[in-house]
Image (cartoon, rainbow, N blue to C red):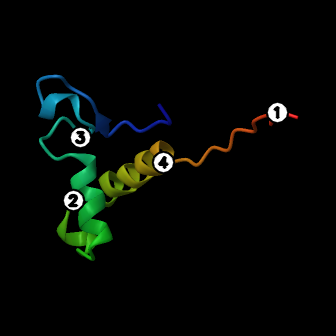
Amino acid sequence: MLGLDRITFDPSIMGRQACIRRMRIPVSLLVNLVANGKPIEEILEAEDIRQSLLYTAWLTQERVYPFKTAR
């Protein structure tokens, strides 16, 4: 998936939630910390954060589906 080798899904870790490198650190936590102003240097490696943001962006892609209206 998108070459995100640091994002892992393991049923025995956090119930298969997206985590960083098989650790008990969910992607959602990293994104929340960054969004709330925690300095990146105080969280984890920059590549962990970069991949977390890429994964989150991929999950939240906006899609527009055209639909036909009845005439």
Q: Quadrant of the C terminus?
A: top right
Look at the image and tell me whether residue 45 can be seen.
no
In depth, the one of 64 and 7 nearer the eye is: 64
Q: Amino acid at mark 1?
A: Ala
Q: For the residues labelled 3 and 4, say whether their Cβ atoms are less than 8 Å apart.
A: no
Q: Secondary structure at mark 4?
A: loop
Q: Which amino acid, mark 2?
A: Leu
Dot in front, 3 or 4: 4
Q: Position of residue 8 (x, y in %)?
A: 28, 33
Residue 28 drawn at (x, y percent)? 26, 51
Label 3 vs label 1: CA separation? 45 Å
User: Furthest-top residue in view?
Assistant: 11
From mark 3 to mark 4, how far is it between C-alphas?
17 Å
Q: Between disc 2 and disc 1, whose residue precedes?
A: 2
- CA gap between label 2 and label 3 equals 12 Å
Secondary element under disc 1, as helix, strand or loop, is loop
The kind of residue tagged 4 is Thr
Label 3 neighbour load within 10 Å: few <14, some 14-19, many 20+: many
Q: Going from the N terminus, do you reach mark 4 or mark 2 first?
A: 2
Which disc is residue 60 wearing?
4
Q: Which mark is residue 44?
A: 2
Write the residue at 17% across / 22% down.
Answer: 11
Counting residues from the start of the chain, the first of labels 3 and 4 encountered is 3
| Disc on res. 70 | 1
In the picture, residue 4 is in which quadrant? top left
Q: Earlier in the sequence, mark 2 or mark 3?
A: 3
Instruction: Please say if the residues under marks 2 and 3 sit with CB atoms less than 8 Å apart.
Output: no
The amino acid sitting under disc 3 is: Cys
The tag on residue 19 is 3
